[in-house]
């Protein structure tokens, strides 16, 4: 279970203090006596329910109380949260964590949320805790939740697939002047390999936009793998490697080196590729070239070896996954 299990969080229990919904988006939610949680949808009657990853929002009662102690005086649902639970620090749990309350089972899908427009709470207090402390989940098993019900934290499903996101960088593509074929090509290969591709994005060659999305995908959605396509050449607009390195926490150069090495067997122009491969928290980020053909070739070179590394990042595998002989070949760094 990795660090998650070691901290003793699994099995921790809390008490539901409030269930809140709203009929329309963008307004405060109101308390209800019970919530009917529908599988792969959300809470019946809530405007934020639907076929997406943010079906249910949760906030720790303890965090709200600490905020109110500073004079906020907010009521349940004021932050737009669906569930207020005492005794569980949701912000400390990883994506994939299961939250079980009676018959209902939720799976955490995102931590935090960007605040696009400052709410009345922010205007009054100078901050809002929902973007920082709130988490989101999807409904895995349906049922009824009422105030006073006990919620239990359980480890993520060990059999869940590795997750991925694909970002294509293209000025013309973002303007609708060119169809993106690189992103869908990568998505198709990943899905055939058993990955769950959570997002497929198309952005202009703007470093600030790329950095923002990479940070969100690694920190909030906590995807296992992010692939970028495009922006790795010599053009002045090609800034993908630089943007990727700016948000990186650790380097993983062997993957990018392997792509260039194998690609040299196809064309000597592969030496001009500037793509990098890095790690941010528990997410691996790999830059791929921009053409669909090069994406298929590059991903084909590395896809078979990625799973072991991603499982190590996730905490479900160890460095010495093969044997002592392999460990020696890798410099004896296995543990």
Image (cartoon, grey):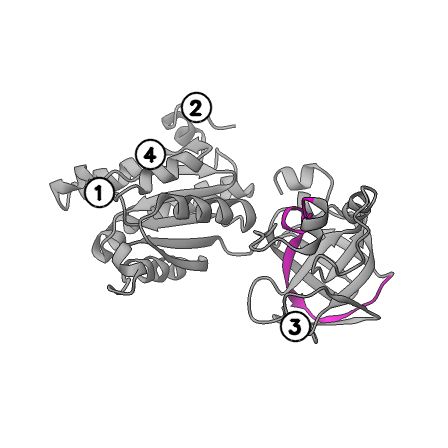
Cα distance in 3D space between marks 3 and 2:
58 Å
Q: Can residue 218 be seen from the camera position used here?
A: yes
Mark 3 falls on what kind of element? loop
Give the mark toward the camera: 3 or 2. 3
Sequence-first disc among 2 and 1: 1
Sequence-first disc among 3 and 2: 3
Cα distance in 3D space between marks 3 and 1:
46 Å
Q: From the viewer's perspective, tell me whether residue 114 is left or right of residue 124.
A: left
59, 185: nearer the viewer: 59
Q: Are marks 2 and 1 in contact (CB under 8 Å)?
A: no
Q: Can residue 103 be seen from the camera position used here?
A: no
Q: Which residue is mark 2?
A: 332
54, 127: nearer the viewer: 127
Cα distance in 3D space between marks 2 and 1:
36 Å
Mark 4 falls on what kind of element? helix
Cα distance in 3D space between marks 4 and 2:
17 Å
Sequence-first disc among 3 and 1: 3
Q: Which residue is outermost to the front? A: 124
Cα distance in 3D space between marks 1 and 4:
19 Å
Cα distance in 3D space between marks 3 and 4:
49 Å
Which disc, if any, is residue 114?
Answer: none
Q: Which residue is mark 1?
A: 233
Give the mark toward the camera: 4 or 2. 4
State the image coordinates of residue 313 (x, y, percent, origin top left). Answer: 51, 40
Q: Which residue is mark 4?
A: 254
Mark 1 falls on what kind of element? loop
Q: From the viewer's perspective, tell me whether residue 115 is left or right of residue 295.
A: right
Q: Which residue is mark 3?
A: 24
């Amino acid at each position: 279970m990795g660090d998650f299990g070691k901290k003793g969080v699994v099995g921790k229990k809390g008490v539901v203090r409030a269930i809140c919904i709203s009929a329309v988006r963008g307004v405060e939610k109101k308390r209800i006596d019970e919530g009917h949680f529908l599988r792969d949808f959300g809470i019946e009657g809530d405007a934020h329910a639907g076929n997406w990853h943010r079906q249910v929002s949760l906030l720790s009662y303890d965090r709200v109380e600490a905020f109110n102690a500073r004079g906020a005086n907010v009521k349940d649902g004021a932050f737009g949260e669906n569930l207020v639970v005492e005794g569980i620090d949701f912000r400390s749990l990883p994506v994939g964590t299961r939250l079980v309350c009676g018959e209902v089972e939720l799976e955490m899908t995102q931590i935090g949320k960007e605040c696009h427009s400052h709410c009345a709470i922010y205007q009054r207090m100078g901050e809002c805790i929902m973007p920082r402390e709130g988490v989101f989940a999807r409904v895995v098993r349906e049922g009824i939740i009422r105030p006073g019900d006990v919620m239990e934290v359980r480890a993520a499903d060990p059999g869940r697939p590795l997750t991925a996101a694909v970002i294509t960088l293209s000025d013309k593509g973002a303007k609708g002047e060119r169809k993106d074929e690189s992103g869908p090509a990568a998505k198709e290969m990943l899905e055939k390999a058993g990955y769950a591709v959570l997002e497929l994005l198309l952005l202009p060659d703007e470093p600030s936009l790329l950095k923002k999305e990479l940070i969100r995908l690694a920190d909030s959605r906590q995807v296992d793998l992010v692939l970028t396509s495009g922006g790795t050449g010599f053009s002045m607009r090609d800034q993908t490697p630089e943007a990727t390195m700016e948000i990186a926490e650790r380097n993983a150069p062997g993957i990018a080196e392997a792509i260039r090495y194998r690609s040299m067997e196809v064309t000597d122009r592969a030496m001009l590729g500037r793509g990098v491969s890095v790690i941010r928290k528990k997410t691996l980020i790999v830059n791929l070239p921009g053409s669909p053909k090069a994406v298929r070739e590059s991903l084909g070179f590395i896809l078979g070896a990625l799973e072991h590394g991603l499982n190590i990042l996730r905490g479900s595998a160890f460095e010495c996954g093969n044997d002592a002989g392999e460990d020696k070949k890798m410099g004896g760094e296995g543990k």
